[in-house]
Amino acid sequence: MRRLTRYFLAAFIGPLFASAGALVILVLMADLMERLDDFITGKVPFKLAAKYLLALIPLRLTEILPVAAMLAALLSLGNLSHRKELVAAMSGGVHPWRLVRPLLWVGIALSLLCLGMGEYVTPAASRTTKKIWTENVRHAPSQRRVKIGNVTAAGAGGLFYSVGLLDTEKGWMEDVVVDRSDGGRPVSQIRSAKAHWKKDRWVFVDGVQRTFKTNGVEIASQRTFSSLELKTRESPMDLAPPEEITESLGYQSLKRHIRRLKNLGVPTRDLEVDLYGKLALPWANLIVLLLGIPFAFQKSDGKVKAVAFALAVSFLYFGLMQVGRALGQKPWCPPWMGAWMADMIFAVVGAWMFVRMRKPA
């Protein structure tokens, strides 16, 4: 059985890499053709243009991997079915589910890979492409601000920061007020002329610390200090207003951003849909296999129809993703349901087809 598993994996992995590579090249060529006039007008050096395209690879790879997985399943199983190898294996008493189980494990591995890339790779890649496009192609000034004035931000544990000047590069702030509340009731306050970031805490210099009575208005105690440490999760970059698009933020970073906005009373429904979408999209790698495998078992009509079916399913999936995103922004639809709608529909259809899977025709 192990030999048969390796044989099926080898038959699937080859088309998977070939499909992913071909689709990435096609998509990058389309991106290059679309941006070519801007690169020429902006006099972008070849090395920088190549860096831009290379930074696009992780972004495009996460988008085309489900298409490549579907195509690989159709081509590999279609070829095995055409050569009657599937019939031969099942004639030996092997159940169809046992034959395709390694493919599903690959689908799970691809989904986990895309989840990891979405958290640790694609945000940095997105920031790189945005920086090159803004500064080197459009020749616009950098959008990254190092010193930011009049910053207000909500933090964990009921903290609220009001900062006159924040330097995210050197890690210090001036004219600082940090209020702590419990259930909306002021508990304590720190006022400081200056503070600097030290690993996992802020060190306040030359200030006043106050605590309030239970009514939240009268001062219970007050003391001055020359130095005061406050251990907190909010680093200088966490306090800075996020200027990146959601593609430039990982799941955890976007989640922290949404939490701060909620503490400030800012509507976050559209961002919540994007947040759940960062979890939903990677699992398309597994879900499309639930559709592709039963179809490949029954059909061996050639590569052209396999490609057409894979593209049709992919367009339908991404179309449903956009519909779900729009619905998720409606008050009556929970954001998670909008983000997961396409996955849920395809998973139900795929599971039904998978359960009904029979021996190839």
Image (cartoon, rainbow, N blue to C red):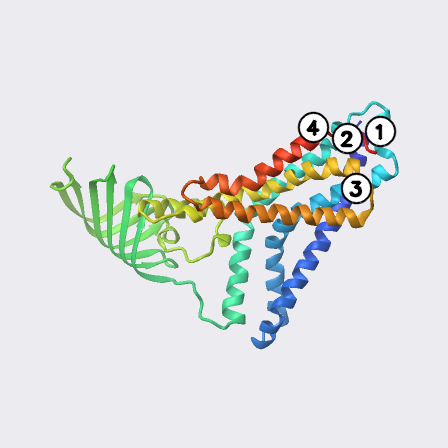
Q: Is residue 11 visible?
A: no
**Badge 2 vs badge 1, beta-carbon distance below 8 Å:** yes
Question: Where does label 3 land, which residue?
Answer: 76
Mark 1 nearby-residue class (10 Å; few <14, some 14–19, many ≥20): some
Residue contact between numbered discs 2 and 4, judged by CB atoms under 8 Å: no
User: Residue 259 got which mark?
Assistant: none
Residue at 32 percent across and 56 percent down: it is: 172
Q: Which mark is residue 89?
A: 1
Q: In the drawing, does residue 68 fall left or right of residue 304?
A: left
Q: Residue at x 61, y 45 (%)?
A: 317
**Hey, what amino acid is under mark 3?**
Ser
- Please state which of the two labelled residues, at mark 3 or mark 4, is closer to the viewer: 4
- Which residue lies under the disc numbered 4? 355
At label 4, counting other C-alpha atoms closer than 10 Å, the crowd grade (few under 14, some 14-19, many 20 or more) is few
The quadrant in which the C terminus is found is: top right
> Which element carries disc 2, helix, strand or loop?
helix
Q: Which of marks 4 and 3 precedes in the sequence?
A: 3
Query: What amino acid is found at the position of numbered circle 1 in the picture?
Result: Ala
Q: Which mark sits nearer the N-terminus, 2 or 4? A: 2
User: Residue 98: where, in percent of width, then height?
Assistant: 75, 27
Tag 2 residue: 99
